[in-house]
Amino acid sequence: MVAIACATTIGLEEIRVFLSYLVWTEGEAVSRTTLGLLAALPFAGAALAGLFLTRIGPRRGLLLSAVWLAIGYLAEHSSDLPIADLLLSGVCVLLWGWFLVGALVTLRRGTALGLVIGSSIDLALRLAFFTVDLPWTSDPLATACAVTLAVLLIWAARGAVFATESVGEPTARRAVTLLALGPWLAIGFLVTGNPGQLMARTGSDFGTIAGAAAVGYAAGISLVLGMTTRPLMAPGLTLLGALGALAFIPLWLGWLGGPVWVAVAATSSAVLLGGALRTFEGPATRPSASATAIGLSFGLVGCLGALYLTYAVYDSVPLVAGLVLALVTMGIVGAALTLMASDTAADVSLWPIRLSSSALLIIGLVQAFTWAAPAGLDRAPSELTVMTYNIRGGFGADDRWDLERIAHAIELENPDVVVLEEVTRGWVIASGTDEALWLTRRLGMQMVFGAAAGDLHGNVLLSRYRVDGESLRYSAHVAAALPRGAVSGIVQTERGPLLFIGTHLEHTLGAEDVRRSEASELLELAAKLRPAVIFGDFNAEAVAPELQPLREAGFADGAGSLGVAGLTWPTQGPVRSIDHIFVSQGLRALTARIPISLGSDHLPVVLRLERL
């Protein structure tokens, strides 16, 4: 159980690393079909585990896959090269699949409990590090946690191998319930283990969500423990989990009592997985691992398909509903099969359960009681420094994800207000980090997030002063391209209110009409208050025809008016000027500069201005 928990924590982290680096290092060079096939390789590779275990023996295969997974994990954690990280994380995902197959045919009892505990540890670590996975950070504490996971994995796997009395798998019919792993993983990545998504849907702050999710996951561990030690409880608890799955409806619709729905939904997911995998808790009926390997690989590929589909359609309501329904079905099927078998209770050690539950609850409750959003100052001076920066989801010009590098570039300019484009808040294919949350805490600035693609991708406005804001999704849109939008906020200055609007316009070649439409919608947003600043990534020159509506409305390019060359893309050897700060009448540009930073494929633009 300890081995499965540690391996699962590592596996979840490495899935986020693998999918992120695959998209950001290879996504622009290959077609989406090729990208999907490359992504599927380590997930589908779990099907080869049956052959692997047959050739070298299940016990030896379990131990070897654990050792290789631990070594690969530590190597990836210490690597600083995107391509190396991509390859190592892909190998780790493959080895995690092999390890799970080995565990299901050797350990069997406690597998579901180990998976649930592993996902809880993963959540605990993400809450402790404000949603940043261990492989993404060089923090000494994160490194210590990674080493501890790797050592525990090897130690526990070695002990489990010697304690194993029998080897084998259930019938192919019962192995079908492994498909539940797909929707369970996807739901965790997209909803229950994704603080950014939970905050977006419930309107709650990070502390509240941290506490609610921790309680839900801890309760899930307790109920799955009951299933493991008292098999006859499985059907009843699975039915309870199926009813609890109804909590996803008010959670997703943002009904009153959001944190309660979060906790119930998290508990329900764990219980349903426990019900589905009860088929593996009983005695083996045949010595092979083929059905287990195939069932697990289908489950993992199903998870991958659900994740990629999310980022293709953006409207995740039908998808999440389908995932929940699939998990409920698999849970009920597994529990029903349990009634028809003479399953026996498993004898499990309670210390890992108590330790993981306690750690999760402590971290969640500490965040709940100590989290406070940065407090902005009351009134800004008449002279302010503003900045725009397309951060490319934290992936730099070298394709390496490093949000600290972004924060450092911002700190060097000491802006009063900064707008960032291409910010994600929990996208699995973009590190899985809530970047807006992390940056607002790291920089001590108030935040207004403007979602454009789904709930978790868009623009963020950061301010050292109190800001009231809103967001806008553009009505014009290019098919197969990311939806675009804007975010706005009003800051009180010594000489009156000042409106800031951050935006990211359509990038597709030949989409001048779409950008012109977006520029017109920007003016509708700017009509509520003048003077105003409109800044961001316009994907067009400041003098481009599609930006004519801004110029006609009295907005001037701040850097251009001072004669500052505004080449901002790409970072190394820029050839285009597409990031701008436009100022209306009532504002005067004082100084402008284009700082050098490798934190993104864009260079930031900084403008010192005065409100007249």
Image (tube, grey):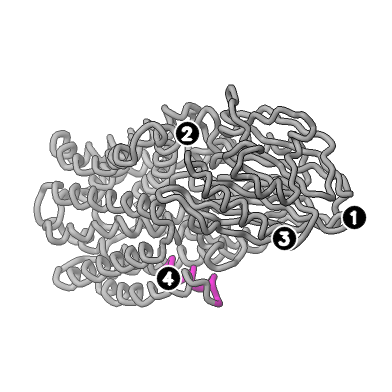
Report which quarter residue 220 is drawn in.
Answer: bottom left
Residue bearing the label numbered 4: 248
Residue bearing the label numbered 1: 495
Rounded to the nearest angstrom, the CA distance separating label 1 from label 4 is 47 Å
Q: Who is closer to the viewer here, 452 or 210?
A: 452
The residue mark sitting in front, 3 or 2, is 3
* Dominant secondary structure of the residues highlighted in magenta in the image: helix
Local packing at callout 4 (Cα closer than 10 Å; few below 14, some 14-19, many 20+) is many
Residue at position x 52%, y 72% from top? 254
The secondary structure type at the circle numbered 3 is: loop
263 in relation to 18, above or below:
below
Q: Between disc 1 and disc 2, whose residue precedes?
A: 2
Local packing at callout 3 (Cα closer than 10 Å; few below 14, some 14-19, many 20+) is few
240 in relation to 34, above or below:
below
Residue bearing the label numbered 3: 527
Q: Between disc 4 and disc 2, whose residue precedes?
A: 2
The residue mark sitting in front, 4 or 2, is 4
Tags 1 and 2 touching, CB below 8 Å? no
**Residue 150's spot in the image, x, y percent?**
42, 38
Rounded to the nearest angstrom, the CA distance separating label 3 from label 4 is 39 Å
Residue bearing the label numbered 2: 77
